[in-house]
Image (cartoon, grey):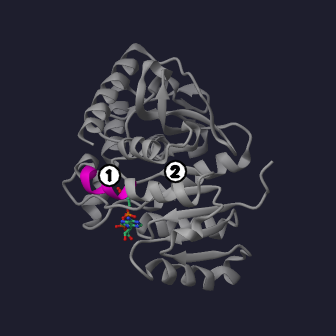
Amino acid sequence: MKPSLYKISVIGAGAVGATLAQRLFESGFADVVLLDVVKNIARGKALDLMDAAPIMGTEKSIVGTDDYKDIRDSDIVVITAGLPRKPGMTREDLISKNAAIVKDVSSKIKIHAPEAIVIVVTNPLDIMTYLAYKATGFNRNRVVGMAGALDGSRFIALIADELKVRRDLIKTYVMGSHGDTMVPIISQTFVNGRLLSSVIPKDKIESIVKRTCDRGAEIVSLLGTGSAYYSPSAAVLKMVKAMMDDAGDVVTASFYLNGEYGLKDICMGVPCRFDRRGVIDVMKLELSNEEKELFSRSAVAVKSSIDLI
Ligand code: APR
C-alpha cells in the first residue's frame, strides 16, 4: 500500500511545466518538485508559487531545483522538457532535438526515481513516449503520454460550443497519434446519451474534427512564440487524478501497445484504465471500419517517425 502523501516531479519549468506545477500545487494534491536544466528558473518559479500558497490555501510544499537528486521517491514524474513548436512547424519537426532531451531526462529518472510513473508531454508525443519507455526500461504500465485527454477536451469544447450544451454531457474518445492523424471516435461520441451523428450533420462533424486536429497549430500561430499550455497542463492533471483516485478511471493516453488494437512495439493513444500503479488495462472499444482504417493510418505515421530515431 502506498502512503496517501503524493510527490510529483515536473521536469521542465517552461510554459507547460510551470503551469502544471501551479495546478498540482494549488489543487493540494501533492508535494511538487519543479526541475529545469536552466539554473535558477525553477527555483524562482517555485518561490513565486510558494508565496501564493497562504492565499490559495494549500499546505503542500513546492521545491524548484536543477538537481535530479530532488526527484527521489516521486510517485509521478512528468516530462515537459523540450522545445515547443514555432508557427508553421508540425510536432514532428521537433523530433531530433527533443529526442536527445527526453533520452537524457529519462536516463536520470531511471537513476533517481526508479519507482515512479512517467507521464510524457514533450512533442512529438507518441515518439517521445516510446523513447521514454525504451530509455527508462520501466514496465510499460508506468510510462504514458498525454494526448487523448487534451484532444478529447478540445473536441468536447468545440461540440459544446456548436450545440450550446453543457460540456459535461459530452463523452468521447480521441485515439491514435497526437498529431494530424488523430482519430476522434465518432461512433462512441455521445451528447447527453445520444450519438453525436444523430444530433449534428456529417459535414459539420467533419469540420469540428478538422478544427480539433488543427487547434494546437491555431494556438501556436496566434501566440507567435511557444505553444498551448493551459489545456495541456489541465489534461495532465486529469491523468494524475485518474491515478490518484485509484478506482480504474479511463483516460485516453499514449501507451506502448503489445497486441492491443492489432499493434505491437508502438505508442499510440488508446483508452487506458488507471490506478495508483499506472495503466492497469487497455479498454477495447468497438471501432467502425472507417475508424479502424484511420487508426491504422495513424499507426503508419507514428511508425515512420519512430524509425527516424
Ligand atoms: N532538462 C530539463 N529541462 C530542460 C531540458 C533538459 N534536458 N531541456 C530543456 N529544458 C527546459 C527548458 O529550459 C524550458 O524551461 O524545458 C523547458 C521547456 O519550456 P518551454 O520552452 O516554455 O516549452 P513548453 O511550452 O513548456 O513546451 C514543452 O511540451 O507541449 C509540449 O510541444 C511542447 O515539446 C514541448 C513541451
Look at mark 1 in the image and give the residue it sits on. Answer: 99
Q: Is residue 290 left or right of residue 241?
A: left
Look at mark 2 in the image and give the residue it sits on. Answer: 119
Q: Are marks 2 and 1 in contact (CB under 8 Å)?
A: no
- What is the C-alpha distance between the residues marked 2 and 1? 15 Å
**What amino acid type is highlighted by mark number 2?**
Ile
Residue at image position (61%, 61%) is: 8
Farthest residue, direction left: 88
Q: Magenta residues, as a range?
A: 94-102
Location of ligand 1 given as a quarter of the image: bottom left
Q: Is residue 107 left or right of residue 5?
A: left
Residue at image position (27%, 38%) is: 305
Nearest the camera: 264 or 208? 264
Closer to the N terminus: mark 2 or mark 1?
A: 1
Estimate how packed mark 2 is, as few (under 14), some (14 to 19) or many (20 or more) residues with alpha carbons within 10 Å: many
Q: Is residue 242 above or below residue 87?
A: above
Q: Position of residue 235 (x, y in %)?
A: 52, 51
**What amino acid type is highlighted by mark number 1?**
Ala
Does the magenta segment cover residue 243?
Answer: no
Residue at image position (40%, 62%) is: 81
Q: Quadrant of residue 307?
A: top left
Nearest the camera: 275 or 66? 66
Tally of marks:
2
Q: Is residue 107 above or below residue 248?
A: below
Does the magenta segment cover residue 101?
Answer: yes
Q: Position of residue 255 (x, y in %)?
A: 49, 36
Quadrant placement of the C terminus: top left
